[in-house]
Amino acid sequence: QVQLVESGGGLVQAGGSLRLSCAASGRTFNMYTMGWFRQAPGKEREFVAAIKWSGGNTKYSDSVKGRFTILRDNFKNTVHLQMNSLTADDTAVYYCAANLGYFGSKVSLYDYWGQGTQVTVSS
């Protein structure tokens, strides 16, 4: 079992930056692939980024590639999403997720989810 708690969301102007954090409980955190997803009002939840258990492999959606960076610290059981050059299109609730064994973008293949943190970008 893994419990996930996101933090770091807020209101930021377009062009600004935010750093989201996800704190995970569980002694086997370093075995999980971690992902970030987001859901805007009236839209489906979509993949943002993922990082393998070792931290050596990452994956990003085309819409955030080059602007967002996913990082993990297995000693502190945390994963971060550094978001730069934010635009109004990045406004959404951001969710941290975890799974064992799958490294990809499918929402349905992630087993554990946090409650989400709101990110609002004003234009």
Image: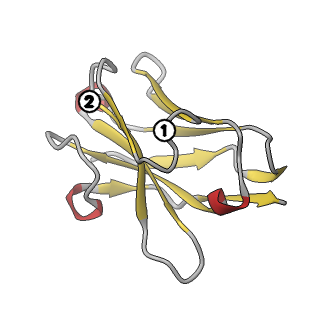
Q: Is residue 51 above or below residue 104?
A: above
Residue type beneath disc 1: Lys
Q: Position of residue 80 (x, y in %)?
A: 54, 33
- Rendered residue at 53%/33% (across/down): 66
**Between marks 1 and 2, how big is the CA–CA gap?**
29 Å
Q: How many other residues sit within 10 Å of disc 1, few (<14), some (14-19) or many (≥20)?
A: few
For residue 55, what is the image quadrant? top left
Q: Nearer the viewer, mark 1 or mark 2?
A: 1
Q: Position of residue 38 (x, y in %)?
A: 50, 60
Is residue 81 visible to the viewer in this orientation of the structure?
no
- Residue 65's label in the rendered image is 1
Between 100 and 15, the one nearer to me in the picture: 15
- Residue 28's label in the rendered image is 2
Which of the two discs, 1 and 2, labels the residue nearer the N terminus? 2
Q: Is residue 108 above or below residue 68?
A: below
Residue type beneath disc 2: Thr
Mark 2 secondary-structure assignment: loop
